[in-house]
Amino acid sequence: MRDSTSTLIVYGLTLLFAFFNVGFIFMTPIKILSLFSWIIVFTLFMIPTGISYLIHKITKIPFSKIFCGMLGIIIFANGILYKYIHSPRSYNLSFANITLQLPNKIWTVTEKDDKATISLYGQRHSSAVLMVTPFPNDFFEEYTYVEFIEYMLKVLAPHANLDYKIRGCGAVNFECTTYEYNLSLNGKMTKATYSFLKDDFNTVFIGTLSDPRSDGKNIDELFSIINSTTRMNETDAKK
C-alpha cells in the first residue's frame, strides 16, 4: 500500500518536533530561536525525511519502516551525544596549579592571564559564573578575607548589603572558608559567594555569582566545582 501525502506530512512533523524537544536539553531558548530552528528544518527534518523517501522509492520498502529506522538511529545518536555532554570532566588550571571537576561539558572555561572564568552555557547568557584567581599567602597577612571582600564590593557594588554568612566548604587538603552574600547588581538580586582555599603554596580565591531565581541545581553545581578542587600534582599522581 502506498503512503499518502498526509501520512508523509505526519511523519515529517513527528521528526521535526522530536528534534525540537531534544534541542531543549542542550541549548538556551535564545540559541534555539536563532539557530536550532534553522538546523531542525533544513538539516534534521528535510534530509532524513528525503533520504527515507528516496530509499522507499528505490527499494519499495514501506516508508513507515524506513522512517522509524532512521528516527531510531537519530535518537540513538542523540542519546550517545547526551551522555557525552553530561558526563563530568577534569580541567587543569595551570596558573593556579589546581584541578577542578566540572559536572558536565556545558560548563565552559575561559582563561585569561592569571584568571579563569567558568560559566554555564557561556558568559553572555549564564545564570551561574565562577571566577578563579590565585594569590600569594602573604597577601592576606595584610588583609583579612572579609576586608578583602568588602573592599572589592565597594568598587563593584557600592550600595551592596555587606551582611554575610559563612558556608561550609569541602575542598580536601585546603584550609577552606566560604562567605555568602546577597547583592543587588544592576537592579537585580544576585547570590554571591567568595571562597578562599589556602595551602602551603598559595591562596586560591574563587568567587561565584548566580541568579537566585535560576534552577537550584546550578548553584549546587557551583559548590560541587569548588569542593572538587585538588592540586594538579595530586590528580596527576592518580592517573
Image (tube, grey):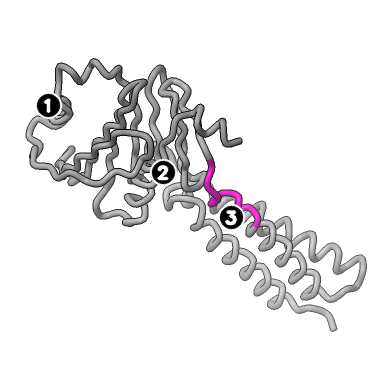
Residue 82, numbered label = 3
N-terminal of the two: label 1 or label 2?
Answer: 2
Is residue 155 visible to the viewer in this orientation of the structure? no
Q: Which residues are magenta?
A: 80-89
Which residue is the site of mark 1? 147
Which quadrant of the structure image shows residue 207?
A: top left
Height in image: 38 above or below 59? above
Of residues 176 and 68, the one drawn nearer to the viewer in this rendering? 176
Dominant secondary structure of the residues highlighted in magenta in the image: helix
Height in image: 35 above or below 144? below
Mark toward the viewer: 1 or 2: 1
Mark 2 falls on what kind of element? strand
Instruction: Indicate whether residue 86 is drawn in magenta.
Output: yes
Is the Cβ of the residue at disc 1 closer than 8 Å to that at disc 2? no
Q: Is residue 11 left or right of residue 131?
A: right
Which residue is the site of mark 2? 120
Location of residue 72 in the rendering, given as x and y in whole percent from the top left corner: 72, 67
Is the Cβ of the residue at disc 2 closer than 8 Å to that at disc 3? no
N-terminal of the two: label 2 or label 3?
Answer: 3
Location of residue 2 in the rendering, given as x and y in whole percent from the top left corner: 83, 80
- Amino acid at dot 3: Tyr
Which quadrant of the structure image shows residue 41?
A: bottom right
Mark 1 falls on what kind of element? helix
Location of residue 106 in the rendering, given as x and y in whole percent from the top left corner: 49, 45
